[in-house]
Image (spheres, rainbow, N blue to C red):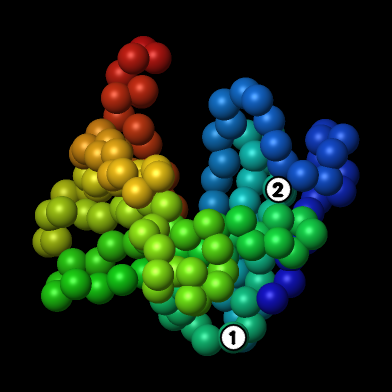
């Protein structure tokens, strides 16, 4: 796995931490013909992180990694019958993921139609249901996750 931070970005720090709200775009693409990867861009169009994966193609697990190679979040794709959902963990250790509850879950409750998804945060063992206020906006091969409640309050 290859991780690259754009060192020419306007950020003076090597870590992407900010106290203001940011919009990040994750672009999943084949970076080379025999691998998978994604790039994360900030609102200025600068690459924040880039991840290349030369392992298996359709993996059920991926990690968000900082510039130093530290795993920030591990996201696992799960399948329950025909419904798919994702779980996020603050660890890359399999034992911790098996023994602990996920940090968050994202699932689409309507399997065959619709683009609304439910988001659940788990804090100190308690589930915080953010409801169906998020949706996945699709345009050709790109996706955008939008918090509809915040979007409506900022009109």
Q: Residue at x 40, y 73 (%)?
A: 98
Q: Is residue 139 visible?
A: no
The residue under label 1 is: 55
Residue 99 sits in quarter: bottom left
* Front one among 113 and 90: 90
- Residue 48, labelled with which disc? 2
Q: Where does residue 3 sit, x and y in percent of width and height?
A: 74, 65
CB within 8 Å, label 2 to label 1: no
Crowd around label 2: few <14 · some 14–19 · many ≥20 (10 Å):
many
Q: Describe residue 145's horizontal placement relative to residue 23 as left or right.
A: left
Residue 19 higher or lower than 52, as above or below: above
Q: Describe residue 42's horizontal placement relative to residue 83 as left or right.
A: right
Residue 132 higher or lower than 75, as above or below: above
Q: Where does residue 31 sit, x and y in percent of width and height?
A: 64, 71
Name the quadrant of the C terminus.
top left
* Front one among 97 and 32: 97
Q: Where does residue 76 sit, x and y in percent of width and height?
A: 41, 68
Q: Secondary structure at mark 2?
A: strand
């Amino acid at each position: 796995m290859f991780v690259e931070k754009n060192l020419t970005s306007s950020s003076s720090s090597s870590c992407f931490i900010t106290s203001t709200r940011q919009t990040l775009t994750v672009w999943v693409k084949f970076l080379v013909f025999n691998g998978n990867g994604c790039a994360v861009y900030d609102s200025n169009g600068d690459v924040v992180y880039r991840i290349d994966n030369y392992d298996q193609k359709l993996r059920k697990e991926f990690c968000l990694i900082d510039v130093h190679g530290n795993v920030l979040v591990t996201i696992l794709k799960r399948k329950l019958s025909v419904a798919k959902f994702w779980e996020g963990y603050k660890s890359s250790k399999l034992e911790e993921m098996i023994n602990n509850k996920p940090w968050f879950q994202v699932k689409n409750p309507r399997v065959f139609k619709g683009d609304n998804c439910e988001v659940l945060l788990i804090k100190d063992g308690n589930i915080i249901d953010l409801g169906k206020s998020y949706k996945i906006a699709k345009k050709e091969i790109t996706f955008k996750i939008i918090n509809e409640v915040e979007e409506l309050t900022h009109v």
